[in-house]
Image (cartoon, helix red, strand yellow):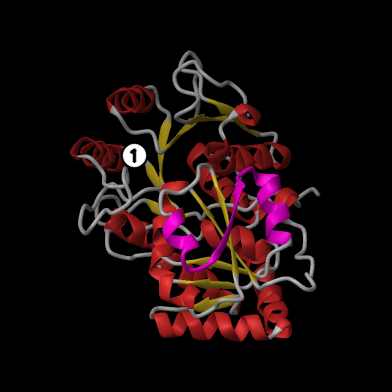
Amino acid sequence: AARVGWVTYDSFPGRKKRFRDLDPFTGMRVGNVAQWMNAQRPDLVNEIYDSSERYDVVVFQKMMDARCQDEAARIRAAGGKVVFDANVNYYEIWGDYFVPGTRPTDTQQRDAIAMTTAADWVVADSTYLEGIIRKMNPRVTWIPDNVDMRIYGGRRIPQADHPIRLVWSGVGKKAAHLLLLTDVFAALPEAELVLVVDTEPDCLPQLERVVRCRIVRFTGRVYARTLAASDILISPKRLINAYEMAHTEYKISLGMAMGLPVVASPQPSYVEAIGHHGGGIIASSTDEWIGALRRLAASPELRAELGTRARQTVDEHYATPVVAAQYLSLLATLAGVPAATAAARS
Protein backbone atom coordinates (compact mmCIF):
# COMPACT_ATOMS: atom_id res chain seq x y z
CA ALA A 1 0.00 0.00 0.00
CA ALA A 2 1.06 3.59 -0.60
CA ARG A 3 1.43 5.73 2.50
CA VAL A 4 0.48 9.37 3.03
CA GLY A 5 1.69 11.31 6.06
CA TRP A 6 0.00 14.49 7.32
CA VAL A 7 1.89 17.25 9.13
CA THR A 8 -0.24 19.62 11.22
CA TYR A 9 0.59 22.28 13.80
CA ASP A 10 -0.80 20.13 16.60
CA SER A 11 0.94 16.91 15.55
CA PHE A 12 4.49 17.86 14.49
CA PRO A 13 6.90 16.91 15.80
CA GLY A 14 5.95 14.10 18.17
CA ARG A 15 2.66 15.50 19.45
CA LYS A 16 -0.81 14.17 18.55
CA LYS A 17 -0.65 10.85 16.76
CA ARG A 18 -4.25 10.12 15.73
CA PHE A 19 -6.59 12.02 13.45
CA ARG A 20 -9.40 11.88 15.99
CA ASP A 21 -7.25 13.77 18.53
CA LEU A 22 -6.53 16.78 16.30
CA ASP A 23 -7.79 20.23 17.27
CA PRO A 24 -11.12 21.24 15.72
CA PHE A 25 -9.73 23.17 12.74
CA THR A 26 -7.11 20.61 11.73
CA GLY A 27 -9.61 17.88 12.50
CA MET A 28 -11.96 19.47 10.00
CA ARG A 29 -9.42 20.20 7.28
CA VAL A 30 -7.30 17.04 7.73
CA GLY A 31 -8.97 14.47 9.96
CA ASN A 32 -12.32 14.27 8.16
CA VAL A 33 -10.67 13.94 4.77
CA ALA A 34 -7.97 11.45 5.78
CA GLN A 35 -10.37 9.18 7.64
CA TRP A 36 -12.80 9.17 4.70
CA MET A 37 -9.97 8.21 2.35
CA ASN A 38 -8.85 5.41 4.66
CA ALA A 39 -12.39 4.03 4.67
CA GLN A 40 -12.53 4.08 0.86
CA ARG A 41 -9.03 3.08 -0.14
CA PRO A 42 -7.11 0.60 2.04
CA ASP A 43 -4.33 0.71 -0.58
CA LEU A 44 -3.68 4.39 0.21
CA VAL A 45 -3.00 4.60 3.93
CA ASN A 46 -3.24 8.04 5.56
CA GLU A 47 -1.45 8.60 8.88
CA ILE A 48 -0.26 11.41 11.11
CA TYR A 49 3.30 11.97 9.93
CA ASP A 50 6.09 10.22 11.85
CA SER A 51 9.56 11.42 10.84
CA SER A 52 11.01 7.96 11.55
CA GLU A 53 8.79 6.38 8.87
CA ARG A 54 8.93 6.55 5.07
CA TYR A 55 5.98 7.91 3.08
CA ASP A 56 5.16 8.14 -0.60
CA VAL A 57 3.49 11.54 -0.08
CA VAL A 58 3.60 13.96 2.85
CA VAL A 59 1.08 16.80 3.19
CA PHE A 60 2.13 19.87 5.18
CA GLN A 61 -1.11 21.51 6.28
CA LYS A 62 -0.31 25.21 6.80
CA MET A 63 3.11 24.13 8.15
CA MET A 64 5.96 26.01 6.54
CA ASP A 65 8.63 27.22 8.99
CA ALA A 66 12.33 26.39 8.71
CA ARG A 67 12.01 22.99 10.39
CA CYS A 68 9.20 22.06 7.95
CA GLN A 69 11.24 23.24 4.97
CA ASP A 70 14.14 21.07 6.17
CA GLU A 71 11.84 18.10 6.68
CA ALA A 72 10.29 18.57 3.24
CA ALA A 73 13.74 18.64 1.64
CA ARG A 74 14.66 15.42 3.46
CA ILE A 75 11.43 13.72 2.29
CA ARG A 76 12.01 14.71 -1.33
CA ALA A 77 15.64 13.58 -1.18
CA ALA A 78 14.41 10.15 -0.09
CA GLY A 79 12.05 9.95 -3.06
CA GLY A 80 8.83 11.11 -1.40
CA LYS A 81 6.46 13.77 -2.76
CA VAL A 82 5.61 16.91 -0.78
CA VAL A 83 2.24 18.67 -0.84
CA PHE A 84 1.76 22.07 0.78
CA ASP A 85 -1.84 22.73 1.85
CA ALA A 86 -1.97 26.54 1.99
CA ASN A 87 -5.14 27.94 3.51
CA VAL A 88 -4.12 31.53 4.29
CA ASN A 89 -2.92 34.27 1.97
CA TYR A 90 0.56 34.73 3.36
CA TYR A 91 1.82 35.70 -0.10
CA GLU A 92 0.35 39.17 -0.48
CA ILE A 93 0.44 41.90 2.15
CA TRP A 94 -1.75 44.88 1.35
CA GLY A 95 -4.61 46.82 2.90
CA ASP A 96 -5.84 47.58 6.40
CA TYR A 97 -5.51 44.55 8.71
CA PHE A 98 -8.01 45.76 11.27
CA VAL A 99 -8.39 42.35 12.96
CA PRO A 100 -5.36 41.73 15.19
CA GLY A 101 -3.14 38.83 14.15
CA THR A 102 -4.30 38.60 10.54
CA ARG A 103 -1.42 40.52 8.91
CA PRO A 104 1.31 38.08 7.84
CA THR A 105 4.77 38.72 9.18
CA ASP A 106 7.70 39.03 6.82
CA THR A 107 8.89 35.63 8.07
CA GLN A 108 5.53 34.01 7.35
CA GLN A 109 5.52 35.47 3.85
CA ARG A 110 9.05 34.24 3.19
CA ASP A 111 8.30 30.76 4.57
CA ALA A 112 5.09 30.41 2.56
CA ILE A 113 6.84 31.33 -0.68
CA ALA A 114 9.71 28.94 0.06
CA MET A 115 7.38 26.04 0.85
CA THR A 116 5.17 26.78 -2.14
CA THR A 117 7.93 26.97 -4.71
CA ALA A 118 9.64 23.79 -3.45
CA ALA A 119 6.52 21.61 -3.17
CA ASP A 120 5.66 18.92 -5.69
CA TRP A 121 2.06 20.13 -5.45
CA VAL A 122 0.15 22.87 -3.66
CA VAL A 123 -3.45 22.80 -2.47
CA ALA A 124 -5.33 26.09 -2.16
CA ASP A 125 -8.62 26.26 -0.29
CA SER A 126 -10.04 29.12 -2.37
CA THR A 127 -9.89 29.90 -6.06
CA TYR A 128 -8.63 33.38 -5.20
CA LEU A 129 -5.67 31.84 -3.35
CA GLU A 130 -5.17 29.35 -6.18
CA GLY A 131 -4.70 32.24 -8.61
CA ILE A 132 -2.02 33.82 -6.44
CA ILE A 133 -0.16 30.52 -5.95
CA ARG A 134 -0.25 29.62 -9.65
CA LYS A 135 2.12 32.51 -10.37
CA MET A 136 4.73 30.81 -8.16
CA ASN A 137 3.97 27.13 -8.77
CA PRO A 138 1.74 25.93 -11.63
CA ARG A 139 1.20 22.62 -9.84
CA VAL A 140 -1.70 23.84 -7.73
CA THR A 141 -5.24 22.57 -7.16
CA TRP A 142 -8.21 24.21 -5.47
CA ILE A 143 -9.78 21.95 -2.84
CA PRO A 144 -12.31 23.71 -0.58
CA ASP A 145 -12.94 23.18 3.10
CA ASN A 146 -15.25 20.25 3.75
CA VAL A 147 -18.49 20.19 5.74
CA ASP A 148 -19.00 17.23 8.07
CA MET A 149 -22.60 16.26 7.38
CA ARG A 150 -22.58 13.96 10.40
CA ILE A 151 -22.70 17.15 12.46
CA TYR A 152 -24.21 19.67 10.05
CA GLY A 153 -26.51 17.36 8.15
CA GLY A 154 -29.65 18.20 10.10
CA ARG A 155 -32.43 20.50 9.04
CA ARG A 156 -33.56 23.88 10.21
CA ILE A 157 -36.50 23.69 12.61
CA PRO A 158 -39.15 26.32 11.75
CA GLN A 159 -39.57 28.66 14.72
CA ALA A 160 -42.86 30.24 15.68
CA ASP A 161 -43.43 33.45 17.62
CA HIS A 162 -39.88 34.69 17.89
CA PRO A 163 -38.04 37.67 16.40
CA ILE A 164 -36.24 37.00 13.16
CA ARG A 165 -33.04 35.31 14.28
CA LEU A 166 -29.77 36.15 12.52
CA VAL A 167 -26.74 33.97 13.25
CA TRP A 168 -23.02 34.66 12.85
CA SER A 169 -20.11 32.49 13.92
CA GLY A 170 -16.36 32.95 14.10
CA VAL A 171 -13.40 33.80 16.27
CA GLY A 172 -14.51 36.50 18.68
CA LYS A 173 -12.13 39.19 17.46
CA LYS A 174 -13.45 38.78 13.90
CA ALA A 175 -16.90 39.91 14.99
CA ALA A 176 -15.53 43.37 14.21
CA HIS A 177 -16.82 42.72 10.68
CA LEU A 178 -20.35 42.95 12.06
CA LEU A 179 -19.84 46.64 12.76
CA LEU A 180 -20.33 47.11 9.01
CA LEU A 181 -24.00 46.45 9.69
CA THR A 182 -24.78 48.87 12.53
CA ASP A 183 -27.12 50.91 10.30
CA VAL A 184 -28.61 47.67 8.97
CA PHE A 185 -29.38 46.34 12.44
CA ALA A 186 -30.87 49.70 13.43
CA ALA A 187 -33.28 49.37 10.51
CA LEU A 188 -34.38 45.90 11.71
CA PRO A 189 -35.57 46.49 15.29
CA GLU A 190 -37.38 43.15 15.32
CA ALA A 191 -34.19 41.12 14.75
CA GLU A 192 -32.08 39.13 17.19
CA LEU A 193 -28.37 38.46 16.53
CA VAL A 194 -26.87 35.21 17.82
CA LEU A 195 -23.08 35.19 17.92
CA VAL A 196 -21.51 31.73 18.15
CA VAL A 197 -17.95 32.44 19.25
CA ASP A 198 -14.94 31.20 21.20
CA THR A 199 -14.72 34.36 23.33
CA GLU A 200 -16.98 37.35 23.85
CA PRO A 201 -16.17 39.98 21.21
CA ASP A 202 -14.76 43.34 22.25
CA CYS A 203 -17.26 44.99 19.92
CA LEU A 204 -20.27 43.45 21.71
CA PRO A 205 -21.26 46.71 23.51
CA GLN A 206 -21.36 48.53 20.15
CA LEU A 207 -23.52 45.81 18.65
CA GLU A 208 -25.87 45.73 21.61
CA ARG A 209 -26.65 49.39 21.10
CA VAL A 210 -28.31 48.60 17.77
CA VAL A 211 -29.47 44.96 17.96
CA ARG A 212 -30.54 42.45 20.57
CA CYS A 213 -27.58 40.05 20.97
CA ARG A 214 -27.08 36.59 22.42
CA ILE A 215 -23.72 34.87 22.91
CA VAL A 216 -23.30 31.11 22.42
CA ARG A 217 -19.98 29.36 23.04
CA PHE A 218 -18.83 27.41 20.01
CA THR A 219 -18.59 23.68 19.66
CA GLY A 220 -19.53 21.91 16.45
CA ARG A 221 -22.65 20.29 17.84
CA VAL A 222 -23.76 23.39 19.75
CA TYR A 223 -23.39 25.41 16.57
CA ALA A 224 -25.43 22.87 14.60
CA ARG A 225 -28.24 23.11 17.18
CA THR A 226 -28.06 26.91 17.07
CA LEU A 227 -28.27 26.93 13.28
CA ALA A 228 -31.31 24.65 13.42
CA ALA A 229 -33.09 27.26 15.55
CA SER A 230 -32.06 30.29 13.44
CA ASP A 231 -33.56 31.95 10.37
CA ILE A 232 -30.78 33.59 8.36
CA LEU A 233 -27.00 33.22 8.41
CA ILE A 234 -25.09 36.45 7.87
CA SER A 235 -21.44 37.03 6.99
CA PRO A 236 -20.46 40.65 6.39
CA LYS A 237 -16.81 41.26 5.57
CA ARG A 238 -14.69 44.37 5.21
CA LEU A 239 -12.89 43.37 2.04
CA ILE A 240 -9.98 45.74 2.50
CA ASN A 241 -6.95 43.47 2.74
CA ALA A 242 -5.39 40.40 1.14
CA TYR A 243 -6.25 38.13 4.05
CA GLU A 244 -10.01 38.67 3.81
CA MET A 245 -10.11 38.41 0.02
CA ALA A 246 -8.54 34.93 -0.04
CA HIS A 247 -10.70 33.32 2.64
CA THR A 248 -12.85 30.25 2.02
CA GLU A 249 -16.62 29.81 2.05
CA TYR A 250 -16.51 27.79 5.28
CA LYS A 251 -18.10 30.53 7.41
CA ILE A 252 -21.27 30.26 5.33
CA SER A 253 -21.20 26.63 4.16
CA LEU A 254 -21.99 25.21 7.61
CA GLY A 255 -25.23 27.19 7.79
CA MET A 256 -26.01 26.34 4.19
CA ALA A 257 -25.67 22.66 5.06
CA MET A 258 -28.40 23.11 7.67
CA GLY A 259 -30.70 24.73 5.13
CA LEU A 260 -30.28 28.35 6.14
CA PRO A 261 -30.37 31.10 3.53
CA VAL A 262 -27.29 33.33 3.59
CA VAL A 263 -26.76 37.04 3.21
CA ALA A 264 -23.08 37.82 2.72
CA SER A 265 -20.60 40.36 1.43
CA PRO A 266 -19.14 39.88 -2.07
CA GLN A 267 -16.07 37.97 -0.91
CA PRO A 268 -14.99 35.75 -3.84
CA SER A 269 -15.60 32.39 -2.13
CA TYR A 270 -19.01 33.55 -0.92
CA VAL A 271 -19.96 34.67 -4.42
CA GLU A 272 -18.99 31.23 -5.76
CA ALA A 273 -20.82 29.26 -3.07
CA ILE A 274 -24.02 31.27 -3.34
CA GLY A 275 -23.74 31.33 -7.12
CA HIS A 276 -23.90 27.54 -7.52
CA HIS A 277 -27.65 27.32 -6.89
CA GLY A 278 -28.68 30.67 -5.45
CA GLY A 279 -28.69 29.64 -1.80
CA GLY A 280 -28.45 33.19 -0.56
CA ILE A 281 -28.05 36.85 -1.41
CA ILE A 282 -24.85 38.84 -1.95
CA ALA A 283 -25.12 42.35 -0.50
CA SER A 284 -22.57 45.12 -0.97
CA SER A 285 -24.19 48.30 0.37
CA THR A 286 -26.21 49.14 3.47
CA ASP A 287 -29.35 49.45 1.33
CA GLU A 288 -28.73 46.02 -0.23
CA TRP A 289 -28.26 44.44 3.20
CA ILE A 290 -31.44 46.02 4.55
CA GLY A 291 -33.40 45.01 1.46
CA ALA A 292 -32.16 41.41 1.52
CA LEU A 293 -32.81 40.89 5.23
CA ARG A 294 -36.23 42.53 5.09
CA ARG A 295 -37.29 40.32 2.15
CA LEU A 296 -36.16 37.18 3.91
CA ALA A 297 -37.64 38.23 7.24
CA ALA A 298 -41.01 38.84 5.61
CA SER A 299 -41.16 35.55 3.73
CA PRO A 300 -40.76 32.13 5.37
CA GLU A 301 -41.35 30.68 1.90
CA LEU A 302 -38.36 32.55 0.43
CA ARG A 303 -36.19 31.50 3.37
CA ALA A 304 -37.19 27.88 2.80
CA GLU A 305 -36.57 28.05 -0.95
CA LEU A 306 -33.11 29.58 -0.60
CA GLY A 307 -32.31 27.22 2.27
CA THR A 308 -33.11 24.22 0.09
CA ARG A 309 -30.81 25.55 -2.62
CA ALA A 310 -28.10 26.17 -0.02
CA ARG A 311 -28.31 22.58 1.24
CA GLN A 312 -28.12 21.27 -2.33
CA THR A 313 -24.97 23.33 -2.88
CA VAL A 314 -23.23 21.74 0.10
CA ASP A 315 -24.34 18.24 -0.85
CA GLU A 316 -22.88 18.69 -4.33
CA HIS A 317 -19.76 20.76 -3.69
CA TYR A 318 -18.63 20.91 -0.04
CA ALA A 319 -19.69 17.76 1.86
CA THR A 320 -16.78 15.69 3.18
CA PRO A 321 -17.09 12.81 0.64
CA VAL A 322 -17.06 15.27 -2.28
CA VAL A 323 -14.04 17.19 -1.03
CA ALA A 324 -12.16 14.09 0.19
CA ALA A 325 -12.59 12.49 -3.24
CA GLN A 326 -10.77 15.47 -4.76
CA TYR A 327 -7.91 15.01 -2.32
CA LEU A 328 -7.90 11.26 -2.96
CA SER A 329 -7.52 11.78 -6.69
CA LEU A 330 -4.55 14.11 -6.19
CA LEU A 331 -2.77 11.97 -3.59
CA ALA A 332 -3.30 8.74 -5.51
CA THR A 333 -1.80 10.32 -8.62
CA LEU A 334 1.24 11.59 -6.70
CA ALA A 335 1.67 8.23 -4.96
CA GLY A 336 1.41 6.36 -8.27
CA VAL A 337 -1.65 4.28 -7.45
CA PRO A 338 -4.98 4.12 -9.37
CA ALA A 339 -7.14 7.15 -8.67
CA ALA A 340 -10.54 5.46 -9.11
CA THR A 341 -12.53 5.53 -5.88
CA ALA A 342 -14.82 2.97 -4.40
CA ALA A 343 -18.45 3.93 -3.86
CA ALA A 344 -18.78 6.11 -0.76
CA ARG A 345 -19.90 4.23 2.31
CA SER A 346 -22.54 5.76 4.48
Is 116 displayed left or right of 313 in the figure? left
Task: Classify mark 1: residues with Cα within 10 Å, few (<14), some (14-19) or many (20+).
Answer: many
Q: What percent of the width, then of the height, locates residue 84?
A: 39, 40
- Magenta span covers which residues? 205-228
Which of the two residues, 149 or 55, is positioned nearer the viewer here? 149
Figure check: 210 above or below 203: below
Residue 227 within the segment the image draws in magenta: yes
Residue 151 visible? The answer is yes
Q: Residue at x 40, y 64 (%)?
A: 179
Is 31 displayed left or right of 74 in the figure? right
Is 22 displayed left or right of 98 in the figure? right
Figure check: 215 above or below 331: below
Residue that extends furthest to the top in the rendered view of this protein: 52
Q: What percent of the width, then of the height, locates residue 233?
A: 59, 66
Residue 126 visible? The answer is no
Instruction: Kindly state the secondary structure of the residue where label 1 is placed.
Output: loop
- The three-letter amino acid code for the residue at tag 1 is Ala
* Residue where numbered disc 1 is placed: 119
Residue 187 within the segment the image draws in magenta: no
Q: Residue at x 60, y 63 (%)?
A: 317
Q: What percent of the width, then of the height, locates residue 304?
A: 72, 78
